Image: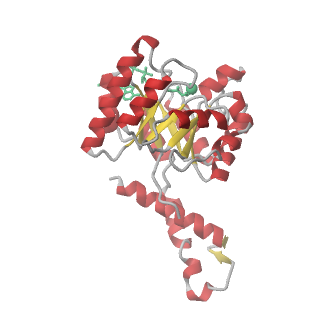
Amino acid sequence: MKPIRPRRSALYVPGSNPRAMAKAPTLGADVVIFDLEDAVAPSEKDAARERVVEAVAALRQAGTSTEIVVRANGLDTPWIEADLAAVGAARPDALLLPKISRPDDLARVRARIAADVALPLWAMIETPRAVLDPLAIAEAQDARLPLAVLVLGLNDLSRETGVRQLPGRAPMLPWMMTALAAARTAGIEILDGVFNDIVDAAGFAAECLQGRDCGFDGKTVIHPQQVAGANAAFAPGPEELAWAARIAPVFDLAENAGKGVLRVEGHMVERLHADMAKRLLALAAAIAAKG
Ligand SMILES: CC(C)(COP(=O)(O)OP(=O)(O)OC[C@H]1O[C@@H](n2cnc3c(N)ncnc32)[C@H](O)[C@@H]1OP(=O)(O)O)[C@@H](O)C(=O)NCCC(=O)NCCSC(=O)C[C@H](O)C(=O)O
Ligand SMILES: [Mg+2]
């Protein structure tokens, strides 16, 4: 089993907001994404980049357990060269690239990152082209700069396609699930998009549960108030864990060694269910280890 790093909540923080940046790593999010892209006005780009480099360095020095990611500006913007150089110097845990539409976009980024820099890339799936073939993006791998996580950008997708962001997200679901299948085919993770209405706690909770039911590893969030809800929704619940603990070891028992399927408490349990249960228990242990 691959080592598990919980990514239940990934909090975007504008690189232009020092107060929020200082607060972000203390809020319990598994991931903090310092944003240089859409949340930062053009006039603030240079100052934000410097501030983000300093913040990443300070967090590394402090040995934070929060995963620290920097979102760069788009490939065709005037800021990308400086962003990539800064990320090379700061060495966050990962670099998030917006508006990746095709494998060649990743190749172009990789070619522009200094040869002595090695770190995971995350790619935003938020253009119409990307949702038509997310597998080509997810499978565009590289040893030095591997693609580790896809992140949905449903605001940009809405803007680019005219699709409305409705409760239940019916018009978006085919794209969301295709991206999820692409991530799983490539063996990488995928995070759900943001929920813009900060005051609609019930709507946010419903969307978190939907994301979890759809198989996402976590949700990107935009405000401190959304962190706890995402953490709760994307963590295994007590009943789920209790069941997992009961079925995880059943095929390890000597009497079941030659069996492929069992009846446990009225349920059919195959080896695949035991494997899923072991993964769930490992995720719970990784969450517990965070303290
Ligand atoms: C959305 C906000 C602009 C709301 O800001 P504001 O009304 O000022 O928030 P509050 O007054 O409620 O804030 C209370 C305190 O919490 C801190 N805070 C707020 N937001 C954050 C945050 N994201 N991280 C850390 N801390 C935060 C405030 O500083 C207050 O603290 P204090 O003063 O000490 O009391 C704002 O929440 C915000 O900017 N959110 C992030 C926006 C962002 O990054 N957007 C870009 C990413 S979303 C996206 O692009 C998705 C994708 O690409 C797509 O296409 O869909
Ligand atoms: Mg976007």
Q: Residue reaching furthest top?
A: 43
Residue 142: x, y in percent? 57, 47
The relative height of residue 240 versus residue 159 in the rendered view (above or below) is below
The relative height of residue 163 versus residue 271 in the rendered view (above or below) is above
Residue 264: x, y in percent? 62, 75
Q: Is residue 198 visible?
A: no
Q: Quadrant of residue 69?
A: top left
Residue 234: x, y in percent? 51, 48
Q: Quadrant of residue 190?
A: top right
Ligand 2 visible in quadrant: top right
Q: Residue reaching furthest front?
A: 115
Please state which of residues 85 and 221 is positioned toward the viewer in this rendering: 85
Please state which of residues 50 and 205 is positioned toward the viewer in this rendering: 50
Please state which of residues 193 and 248 is positioned toward the viewer in this rendering: 193
Residue 169: x, y in percent? 67, 32
Quick check: 46 left or right of 234? left
